[in-house]
Image (tube, rainbow, N blue to C red):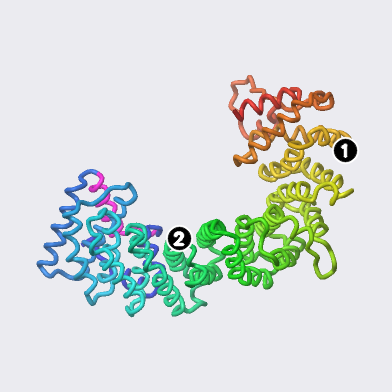
Amino acid sequence: AYAHITTEEEGLWDIDVNVFLSEEANITANYTPRTACGDLVIKLGEWLNAATVEGLLANTRRLYAENASWKAKEAALYLLNQLLGDFQDVEKQIGEESAKGYVDFIQRAVQEEEVFLRARGYLVAGSLTRTSGDALQPIAATFMEASLRAIETDESEIIKVSCIRVLQYYLAALPPALTHAKQSAIIASLANFLNTQDLSDLVDSDDLLITIIETLRDAILLDTSTCLHNGGIDLLFTVASRGASNFQIALLVTETFEEIASTVAAVGAERYAELTVKVLPSLTGAFDVASLTEEDALANLAAELLSVLAENGPSPMPQGFVATVMPRLNRLLLGSQDDELLKSSTAAIKHMLSNDPEQVLTYHDQEGKGGLEIVLIIIDRLLNPAVDDNAAAEVGGLAAEVVEKAGSERLGPYLMQLLRAVAARLGSAGHAGFIQSLILVFARLSLVAPQDVVSFLADVDLDGQNGLQVVISKWLESSINFAGYDDIRQNAMALTKLYNLHDPRLMSIQVKGDMIMPQSDRIMTRSRARQQPDQYTFVPAQLKIVKVLVEEL
């Protein structure tokens, strides 16, 4: 009886399906006797696996034989569902006989008049399918069909959202031969359901939107090549527009789009061009209405998706891609104060420049400014100390691409100005990721012209300090914190090139070595730590390079 749905829960779930979904996903902070019963069954299942399943099945048979109340039947199936959820988490399976023993009860449950018992029947059918191996495959396709039908025809919202959620189980458990044929039908059902919802209510319906997008993601990933024409991307963007402010929804949208962009691009440039035609109007539309004076979650998500799209682009990119997005990105990068928006927008330009430098550099805006000039103005703004380190985290990568792709011929006198600005900003940078991106400008240059890098920095004065001293010190102190295989590899190769120069100017530089451990055995309080900051030995830069390289081996 403790596992029965209470009258209060009935009322809450009837009013708001989000509360029901949060209970089903076990993400609610509301710990009830019903929840405790589920936890107890899970513990019993960990201890006595088969006996627990058999006991639950015997109890369910008794309840149906006695024609018990719908709440008692629902509670029995709920406890099974909790146990099966734990089985899924620890990769256990329910026995074939037990799984088949529940089929009749599921079929009877989904025919019941009571909404919550009917919903439980659909949910248990999916849970059994994914935890019983091949035992239920002959009938599982029928269960999936019934769930799809219920989304379209059942009058209860509880039933509809339960069936939307349980489709994820079928898509994960059933063979592709069964699921691929249902991709379009699933996407259409989700779209039809969303069309029946009041869009103004969806702003506060995060659990519902998360359930929809998780199911949509699984359906799209069955075959991403079809999502350009079966409404998959349209629905993905519709959900994104309603839930962009929710971190989990934004992350799910981004991950799904990453998979779409990478797999479509792998097919070929023509398919990628189709993708850009499909999605660019929605992305640029979000930029056109974005506010530059306050945080705009939808614009942030659009910039992240555009960065993903550009990163996966072919070389060269589709004609007109740069001309379509550059004016919007330029407006955002020169006017916005939002860290995430600046970071994603910078990354988008970096990827465009990497994949199709010619299209970027030959672009001209309405005022006649060339692509190179526009990018240099953007870099200049982002290197300003007034811009937060986190917001400017991608500017180093963009600057490195400009130097590499434009070259000294196109950059002319701007090359030295750009490198000087990067060196100056490196001196004041504090965020590890930002420091890494700035260092990589010099690291990538050092791969091809290490002597020129040393000579240039040696002649630069940064507020009375020698540029070589500032950059090399920061470079060697920060190398241990580098992240990303490619960046670490490039950094190690660049340091090797610098070491092999045996340049006296480099050899004369002293940098931080190892930390000097305090000899006192007194407890180090926070106030004492502030009074006695960490102290380091100083070693020649050449020796520090060797230490860094050894640690990277």
**Callout 1: SS:** loop
Say whether residue 421 is visible. yes
The percent coordinates of residue 297 (x first, y second) are: 61, 65
211, above or below 438, in the image: below
Taking the spot 25% from the left edge, 67% from the top edge, the residue there is: 121
Q: What is the spatial separation of the Cα atoms under label 2 and label 1, in whole angstroms? A: 52 Å
Q: Amino acid at mark 1?
A: Val
- Disc 1 residue crowd, few under 14, some 14–19, many 20+, Cα 10 Å: many
Q: Residue furthest top?
A: 519
Q: Is residue 141 magenta?
A: no
Q: Position of residue 41 (x, y in %)?
A: 24, 52
Mark number for residue 460? 1
Residue bearing the label numbered 2? 221
Q: Position of residue 348 (x, y in %)?
A: 67, 57
Tell me which segment is drawn in magenta. 29-46
Q: Secondary structure at mark 2?
A: loop
Q: Is residue 33 magenta?
A: yes
